[in-house]
Image (cartoon, helix red, strand yellow):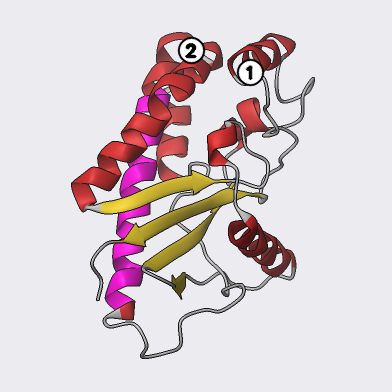
Amino acid sequence: MLLVALVLAAGGCSPEPHAVQSPAKPAEPGSIPDAEALIARGRAISSQAFGLLSSNLLTAIQQSGVSNALPFCSALAMPLTSLVANTNEVTLRRVSHRSRNPVNQANPRELELIERFRSDLAAGEKPRPVLVTNETVTFYAPIVITNQLCLQCHGQPGSEITPENLDLIRRLYPADQATGFGLGDVRGLWRIDFRGWD
């Protein structure tokens, strides 16, 4: 199990944020002060959040398997994400086109980004970070499934997800849409809104 833990810690469901070209209207070059610094900060914050979530998830799996990890995610994933957001004084969310928790359902702009990420990855294009300006500056990066272990909760029911774990998912998340993914699929995206950037 330690080997699995090390693999997940190193690879994870998205080892560091990948990103591609922006959707509707990306920020114009030079329109955001310190854009490169904000991209680097976005990467660091999403990596911090991923590290905190995955290390806690690994502990839960090591203690009692995937059936223990699912209640952990249900109870603690959002508070841990909020902890990272508050520590860094940003707004941080994980959203998806096929959410497990309806609170994490992507909005229309985010859905457009996810579709762009999926299309670009399918075309073999290297992802790049995205900054978008509106009332604030927002960093987006896709969450890509890169580890087989992720498929025990997000893969194919009946093969990768056991009937027992699928039943638990349905009990914890009655509106779940987050199964049927494969390796290399975009699971969703990180969204970081920077406060007081201007």
Q: Position of residue 179 (x, y in %)?
A: 71, 32
Question: Which of the 4 image quadrants contains residue 115?
Answer: bottom right
**Does residue 76 appear left or right of residue 94 in this picture?**
left
Q: Position of residue 81 (x, y in %)?
A: 35, 39
Give the magenta part as a residue range. 36-58
Residue 52 seen from this side:
no
Q: Nearer the viewer, residue 101 or 6?
A: 101
- The dot on residue 68 is 2
Query: Relative to residue 42, is residue 87 depicted above or below?
Result: above
Q: Nearer the viewer, residue 138 or 66?
A: 138
Decide: few, some or many residues near mark 2? Use Cα within 10 Å; few <14, some 14-19, many ≥20: some
> What residue is shown at x 60% (from left), y 43% (from top)?
105
> What residue is shown at x 35% (from left), y 26% (from top)?
56
Q: Position of residue 48 (x, y in %)?
A: 31, 47
Residue 33 seen from this side:
yes
Magenta region's main secondary structure?
helix
User: Which of the two labelled residues, at mark 1 and mark 2, occupies the earlier sequence position?
Assistant: 2
Badge 2 marks a residue whose secondary structure is helix
> What residue is shown at x 67% (from left), y 50% (from top)?
185
Q: Is residue 55 magenta?
A: yes
Q: Position of residue 99 (x, y in %)?
A: 62, 38
Q: Nearer the viewer, residue 37 or 108?
A: 108
Q: Is residue 162 magenta?
A: no
Query: Relative to residue 160, is residue 9 depicted above or below?
Result: below
Badge 1 marks a residue whose secondary structure is helix
> What residue is shown at x 46% (from left), y 88% (from top)?
28
Quarter the C terminus occupies: bottom left
Decide: few, some or many residues near mark 1? Use Cα within 10 Å; few <14, some 14-19, many ≥20: many
**Residue type at the position of mark 1:** Ile
Question: Which of the 4 image quadrants contains residue 156?
Answer: top right
**Does residue 7 appear left or right of residue 24 in this picture?**
left
- The dot on residue 169 is 1
